[in-house]
Image (cartoon, helix red, strand yellow):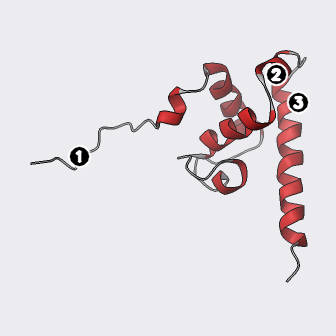
Amino acid sequence: MKSNILEFPIQSPYQRKVSGRLQALASGLMFHCYIQPDRSLVAVLGEGDEHSNQEAIVTWLVKHFDDEAISSMSSPLDELTRALYRFLNDQLDYQEYVPC
């Protein structure tokens, strides 16, 4: 008989594919931007299959910044915070502009 019990904690395969540095930056961005640990930004920042806002932020980081770009930043967390705010504001402006 198959068991329907899932082991806790559930770790998505996505989390294992990214570096600890990107995970740490995503955590820092969540703290700096006061982002809740829910799934509210998955549709905006991620691909839609992430399990949390932190995973969605990691997806956004991977899409928009390579390791070299992040390494060359003098203050990565500050620069990425500004970039994330700009991206979210641009997405909000786009959503408000959609004609009926």
Q: In terms of sequence position, does the residue under pointer 2 or pointer 3 come before the other?
A: 2
Task: Name which residue lies at 82% across and 51% down.
Answer: 88
Quarter occupied by residue 28 = top right
Quarter occupied by residue 92 = bottom right
Residue to which mark 2 is pinned: 70
How would you rate the neighbour count of disc 3 (Cα within 10 Å): few for under 14, some for 14-19, many for 20 or more?
few
Can you say whether 32 is above or below 48 in the image? Answer: above
Q: In terms of sequence position, does the residue under pointer 2 or pointer 1 come before the other?
A: 1
Q: Is residue 66 left or right of residue 37?
A: right
Q: Nearer the viewer, residue 9 or 14?
A: 14
Residue to which mark 3 is pinned: 79
Helix, strand or loop at label 1? It is loop
> Hey, what amino acid is under mark 2?
Ile
How would you rate the neighbour count of disc 2 (Cα within 10 Å): few for under 14, some for 14-19, many for 20 or more?
some
> Hey, what amino acid is under mark 1?
Ile
Task: Name which residue lies at 44% across and 35% down.
Answer: 11
Residue to which mark 1 is pinned: 5
Helix, strand or loop at label 2? It is helix
Image location of residue 38, percent across then percent down: 58, 51
Q: Quadrant of the C terminus?
A: bottom right
